[in-house]
Image (spheres, coloured by chain):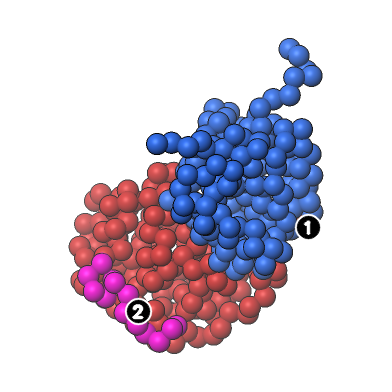
Amino acid sequence: MTFTANHPASRDQAKVMNRFDITKRMVARLKHDEAVIGGIGYTNFDLWAAGRRPQNFYMLGSMGLAVPIALGVALAQPQRKVIALEGDGSILMQVGSLATVAARKQKNLAIVIMDNGTYQITGGQLTSTELGADIVAMARGAGIAQSAWAADEAAFEELIELSLREDGPWLIGCRIDKEKPAETTERDPPRIRDQFMRGLGVKQ
Amino acid sequence: MDEEAPGAWHEIVRDVLKRHQVKLVTYVPDNVLRPLIDAVHGDSFFTAFSCAREEEAVGIVSGAWMGGLRGIVLMQTSGFATLPNAIASLAVPFQIPVLMMVSERGTLGEFNIGQSLVARTMRPVLQALAVEHHTMTRLDEVEFIVDRSITQAVATQAPCVFILSPLLTGGKVFAK
């Protein structure tokens, strides 16, 4: 796992970045209609604010299911890269899904965790990542060997590039600040689903 | 081969799933479902695997549908009891035809009080969410119910639940 050599060994060594800034950096690197599944909360809102890609799916509820939904899309379309964008509180709800992804050895799947150590949308209560839990270490323990903390913005972009170019599954941990999101996702589920399916070429 | 001989319930379900191109099977294991789980694992047409939780299995089948692949979730009654949020906030509002098959525990000879209590929550939840559901009790109705209901789920973009009654499967018998 030489790729992790230049990345922080633990969460507390990673730089605290801005969610909207790194979401924009990620979206700017998507050149092949990659699918992105945005989990609930501010992670999702900033994905919406970063541009209305038809290959984006925005969850509205079902907290914790971004990784399973992304795995389903990846199974259905093995030629397309799929990214699950999820928060720390959300992934803690469905941490078993990391083991499922590892067991599937899903090559076209990457998971990006936005970790600010809080349930920010409900008032900033602490999650267990702020109290010592390390999502990247948990992902490695689940069997996703290619899991790393992004040291800073440049390292984040490198890891995104790597995950788009090389076989996964990948997990990229990002420490982020507690800034409010830039916009709020439109809450229109049938429209979101319909546009996503058209964006994936499933509907014409 | 005797074409008149009806298959076992799990053989009928497997064949109807194939006819409808339902290739993905995600499940949390159950003893009564075991012959169906074995049948789909034994047929290269299917991609079948277990999940840590039933919610996860529903999320995977939802994503697969949006990507153009049909799937079904297999579970037992107590697993269904973990699903109201995923059904109410994902499958129903996003209009995703998630197919679910539930092996019914908790009735007709249940020996575990936890199972018998949780089983009573299943139909009220399905009714509250107005989710199409059918209880299959007889071998001669299995093909019709599964075949027609998959067609309806896809056509109306709505989830559907198939409940496998102990009257059909024999259920799980009292174990000391």
Quadrant in the rendering for residue A189:
bottom right
Where residue B156 is drawn, which disc sits there?
A: 1
Q: Residue at x 44, y 44 (%)?
A: A104
How crowded pointer 2 is (Cα within 10 Å; few <14, some 14-19, many 20+) is rated as many
Q: Secondary structure at mark 1?
A: helix
Residue B19 lies, with reference to residue A68, above or below; the image says above
How crowded pointer 1 is (Cα within 10 Å; few <14, some 14-19, many 20+) is rated as few
- Circle 2 chain: A
Q: Depth check: give the residue in front, B18 or A23.
A: B18
Magenta segment, which residues? A121-133
The hue of chain B in the figure is blue
The answer to whether residue B27 of the structure is visible from this angle is: no
Quadrant in the rendering for residue B2:
top right
Q: Residue at x 54, y 49 (%)?
A: B106
Q: Residue at x 55, y 66 (%)?
A: B85
- Circle 1 chain: B
Q: Which residue is mark 2?
A: A118
Image coordinates of residue A178 in percent, x first then y, are 36, 84
So how many labels did they put on this image?
2
Asked if residue B135 is among those painted magenta in the image, a careful observer would answer no
Image coordinates of residue B38 in percent, x first then y, are 53, 31
Image coordinates of residue B171 in percent, x first then y, are 57, 38
Q: Amino acid at mark 2?
A: Thr
Q: Residue at x 32, y 56 (%)?
A: A139
Where residue B38 is drawn, which disc sits there?
A: none
Q: Quadrant of the C terminus of chain B?
A: top left
The hue of chain A in the figure is red
Q: Secondary structure at mark 2?
A: strand
